[in-house]
Amino acid sequence: MSLMKLRQHQTNFKFSSSVGIFLSIMVATTILVTSQITRANAQSTNRDAPTTLSTNIISVTGLKSEAKTYFYYFIAKSGELKLTLDIDAGSTNGNGVVSTVSVQDQDGNEFSQLLAGATPGIPGRQVKKIKFAQSTPVILMLTLPQGATANYTSKIKIEGDYQLINIR
């Protein structure tokens, strides 16, 4: 094939600019979604290296086969902090399920604790308000016990005076 015919042949296969933009958006979306999934799954089970919170909502699935404790870190600022613990047992957990949240300082001294239980079809909720006189580094410890007959969901919502940064 001559050079002239080869160049003519190559130009016939050029993508329109809209197809190129579409492919670029698809690749960027795939990378973004994958990075979000990875971040959500990287929850610390180590008290000395807690997950630094980047959002005010934590959602975790409790597994029927194993107990888990997760640790999160944030700054409670001077003022009131409101924590809401929701738990949903789903429709197949005959025994019901319980989750606990302990709000502690970095030495393990407890400021407050939340406990919520749920049975099939009846979700549970507990809300606590905690006052802090000054900015305080906080470790939030979420415990998901073993013994459920199916997987279940626990969700913690943080509201009020707090800061989601990585300063320790």
Image (cartoon, rainbow, N blue to C red):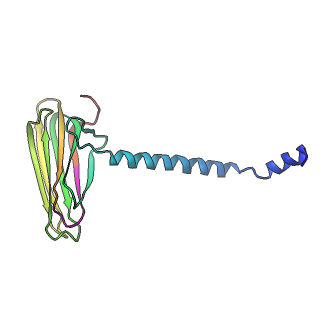
- Residue 4, magenta (yes or no): no
On screen, residue 113 versus residue 52, left or right, reads left
Can you say whether 41 is above or below 119 in the image?
A: above
Can you say whether 154 is above or below 163 in the image?
A: below
Image quadrant of residue 104?
A: top left
On screen, residue 25 versus residue 45, left or right, reads right
The residue nearer to you, when weighing 1 against 152, is 1
Q: Residue at x 22, y 50 (%)?
A: 156
Q: Residue at x 55, y 51 (%)?
A: 26
User: What count of labels does the image hold?
Assistant: 0
- Residue 154, magenta (yes or no): yes
On screen, residue 80 versus residue 16, left or right, reads left
The residue nearer to you, when weighing 130 against 95, is 95
Can you say whether 98 is above or below 149 in the image?
A: above
Q: Which residues are magenta?
A: 147-156
Image quadrant of residue 91?
A: bottom left
Residue 137, how many percent across, how many down? 18, 32
Residue 112, how many percent across, how many down? 9, 43
Q: Residue at x 13, y 57 (%)?
A: 116
Image quadrant of residue 159?
A: top left
Residue 45, how many percent across, how many down? 23, 44
Residue 168, how many percent across, how many down? 24, 28
Looking at the image, the residue that sits furthest to the front is 65
